[in-house]
Each structure stands twice: as C-alpha cells, then as structure tokens.
Image (tube, helix red, strand yellow):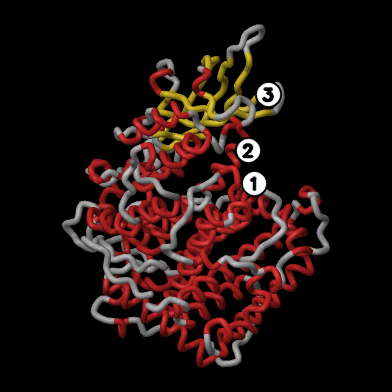
Amino acid sequence: MTTPPPAAEDRIAALESLLADPAERLNPLGDEAVLAADRRGELPPGAESSLRTFGLDAEFVPVPLGGRLTGIAAVAGMLRAISRRDLALARGYGSASLVAAQFVWAYGTPEQQRGTARLLLAGGRLATGAYSGHGLAVVARAGTACWRLEGSLPALANAPRAAGFVTAARHPADGGESVLLIHREDLPPGTVRACSPDEAPALRRIPSGALDFRGWPVPERSFVGRPGQGLPLTVRVLQTTRTLGPWMALGCADTALRAVLRAALGGGARRITSRSTRQAVVAQFADLLAADCLLLVATRSLYLRPALSSIWTAAARFLAPRLLQESTGDLRAVLGVHLLRKDGGYGTFHKHLRDLAELPPGSAVDTRALSTLLPHLATLARRSWTAADTGDIDELFLRDGPLPPLDPGRLDGAIGADPLTSMLADAADRADADSGPVPAALRHRLRELGLRLAELAEQCRRLPEHDPAAVANARGYAHAERYTLLVAAAACLGVWRSARRRPDAGFLADPRWLTVALGRISLRLGRPGTAPAPGHEQEAQEALFAEAVLRCRENRSLDLYETVLGSPAPGPRRG
C-alpha cells in the first residue's frame, strides 16, 4: 500500500526551512547570494544539490510511482517558493522536467511511466519541446514500418544535461502529429548541441541546447500515445500546466514588492509619506492578490470542473503575468532617486523585474491564450453570464481544499456555461445576503462590474457562433481580453466570500482588499467609475498598505497564503 505524502502545506513549509530567510546575508540561497550569482550569469552555487537532497524530484513523480506528486497546485506552490529566491532555479530544476513528465503520466505506457519515474527520482532531468514541434517531422520510410525523425529544435531548457526529451513532431503526409519520449542514450553523438547565452536570451542562466535530427530511426517505444494522434494529447497536457508559469511569476512579484518595501521603509513606515508611492505599493499588492485568486480558481478547476477549465486556465495564462509585470514595473516610481542603485534590496528588485520580463506574455502566448477563448464568447453570451447560471462552485475558492485525481479525458467538452463569471451578474444585489453588510464602495464596484458583464454579453451576442475565423480579429481579441478581467474579478469575489464563511476569518474576509482589487480591474476595463463613498476607498487603500508592511516585517508572503518565509514549521495563517 502506497503511503500518502505529507500535506502540501507541510511540504512547502519544509522547503521554506531549507531555503531559509531570504533576507539573511549568510544564507547561500538568500537575496544577496542569488543576486551575486545572477551577476555572474550562473545559478546559486549548491542550490540544485540542496534541492536534490531535499527530494524535490519526488514532487514531479505521482505517488503510485514512488513520488509525492498529488496535483499541480501543490508542486506549483513549491516552485513559487523557489521563484521567490530565483526564477531561473525554479524553471531549470523544476518546471522544465515537470511539464515534460506530464505527457508521460497522462498518456504514457506503464513501461514509459516506470522508466520516467526512475529517471526523475534518481535526479535526472527532462527537456521538452512539445510546444514547438513544428521544427521536427516524423517520416515513414517507404516500403517499411520504420519511422524516421527529421529536423531541428531551437534552444530547450535543460537539454545539455537532460536524460530524456519529450517533443512533438508533425507528420507531413497526413498533417498529424506525434508526441515522442526520446532517451538520451539512444541518440547518436552530436544530436544535442549546447547553446550559448546569446542563442537563448529567454533562458538566462539555465543550461540550454538545440536538437538536430537527420533521419534518426524512431523506436516504437518512443511514441507517447498512438502515432499521429499527438495534437489532442498536447492540447490537454499543456492545459494542465498552463498556470505553472504564472504561479512562479507571482513569486518573483512577491519578492520585488518586498525588496522595494524593505529598501523604502528602512526604520519605519513613516518614511513613505508620498501618496503616489503608497498608491503604487497598494496597486501592486492588490494586483498580486487578484492574480493569485485567478490562479487558484483556474488550477483547482482542472480537478473540480475539468470540462470548463480550458477557458479559466487560458484567462489565467494571459492575464496573471500581465498584471504582475505591469504593476511590478510601476514600482520603479517608489525608488525615486535610487532607481539606478543596484545594491541590496534595489538590486534584488531589478533582478526579479528582469525575471518577470523573461516570462511570457509574449505576442505568441497572448494570441494562443486569447484564441482559446474566442470560440466560446458568442455561446457563453447567449447561454450564460446571468444570475441563473452561477451553479455550485464554492470548492473552487478554497486555498487548501481536497482535490480528486486529475482525469485528462474530462478536459474535453462543449462549454455552454460559465458559472464563475456569472457570479458578477447579481453580485451587488446579493452582497449583503451572502456576507452581511458590506461597505458602499464595494457594492458600487460590484454593480459596476455587473454592468460591464452585461455590456460584454450584449457585444458578444452579435458574434457568430461556431465560426472562430470570423471572430479572430482585433475586436474579437479585445472582447476576449475584457473577459479575462471579468473572470479575475469573479475569482476575487469568490475567494472573499469563501473566507467570510470560515470561522477563522482573517485578512481575506476583509472587504477592503476586495474593494481595491476590483477597483484596479475596473480601471483596466476602462470604466473606473466614481465610488459613492470615497472615504471608504481611501480607508481600503490604507488598510492594504498597512497589511503589506506588516507582512514584510513578519516575513510572510504577500500572496493568498501568507507563507512564513524560511520558517522551520508552518506558522499560523490568518483566515
């Protein structure tokens, strides 16, 4: 009988104990050591061996195969903890292997799964090019049953040191695609070529390499799933891992805000007297919380509402990194005359700002995420986005609620309902009934967002159904982008409502953070409105500023989880 691993919260706390206090000057994984390694163009010395000793590799392997992987949410939380110190470390050691392995766990044969589990548990690495398989082609050799691989793949993270590769390759003859699991030991010399930093600027400090195939005979055991049937497999697997990048990006934004606060506060909060400076801190904190609400809901939907998860994970993939990049960049105003300083907390801020810039969204990722949404907008406008379509989705908003096993087969399905975004339709009317009296400023924000949803529904009802090509234009993409903002607003509302029902209600049950977060979303929608009680708005902003300062002093994370950084044991969490 397989022994279940410790709870995810306990595993994250144990990892935090290993990573230790990032502000500690002698910590080999602290801010100063990581910043020094970044300037040398390398990973922190000893960091990867420490993670290997900790057993992080087991977090990438399912429990039945000897690991501790119980779901994407748990391992994403651990990669976020590492990203607070160094995004390159989290990407190179963690996410590259994890994404590659997901293809095998979902669709590999038992032999492929056992072999991949042994590889990872022994400290081996995987590299994946499954999202860029256009560079490879699988060609059937005339008169034989032999398949041969032709073509090249550009820089892949981990490739020079990977023991295995998961990649997609097209079939030119019929337009199909296959997913391949390739073992390094099977490849002829010269297939893998290490890339220079100039060839892979987006993989700064992560060893990367290119693959070059010239008629390599593909063993039958290399196919993951049936030959030629790889495209739906790739779509489903990348859907399950779509939120990993944003989860890690949030760790970078957390550290960037903490570094700015520590540099600006010094001896006390009174040193920040500029209203615009305080507003920049509050704006980034509110955007960080909104992004985390969206990521929480999107990730849990893979397990709890798999048929609907594609639209919510696409919204999170597009919007969360954008919120974090923009608001973290705005923090440069806080530094004032110290903007060009590179020492201490100033250097840490600039380092994490660069890390955020190296993550998508790029134009290709933006287009893919929004293109996932386009075919559904007309249908949802006609059949959903009303108060009658909210449904029972309370489990989506629990930070630590149990999850069933992931079933990739349920990720497909016609999407004719959107109970999450539909929450906004009557949120203002239900606010008091659901959670007791709420401030007028919050009710105003909810009413404003309900109107924006109604406007979007009216516009999308004019779009043709079942004709993606007809809506793949500037107007269609603008509708999709507005939709992602409304999904984020609904996620924030749901997390707040869930916190209000808990007996240990803490910060997340306070309506003030929600008021500010929804105000930021309204601003991006282009309709900021005017709150009927501006005093409440100012009070809400001051409350968020005080919370950010308190967490910084208590060494707690600035996300939904308030993780104690470097703690040897889980600290008490408020709410």
Mark 2 or 1 closer to N-term? 2
- Mark 2 touching mark 1, by CB under 8 A? yes
Expressed as whole percent of the image width and height from the top left, the position of residue 213 reads: 51, 20
Judging from the image, what secondary structure is the residue with disc 3 in? Answer: loop
Residue at 56% x, 47% y is 239
Instruction: Find residue 8 and report its image quarter.
Output: bottom left
Between label 1 and label 3, give the one nearer the viewer. 1
Q: Residues within 10 Å of mark 2 (few under 14, many from 20)?
A: few
Expressed as whole percent of the image width and height from the top left, the position of residue 575 reads: 38, 75
Q: Which residue is under mark 2?
A: 232
Instruction: Find residue 165 and report its image quarter.
Output: top left
Residue 168 vs 75, above or below: the answer is above
Q: Quadrant of the N terminus?
A: top left
Residue at 58% x, 71% y is 489
**Would residue 20 be visible to someone looking at this image?**
yes
Judging from the image, what secondary structure is the residue with disc 1 in? Answer: loop
Name the residue furthest left.
Answer: 26
Q: Amino acid at mark 1?
A: Asp
Q: Which residue is under mark 3?
A: 172
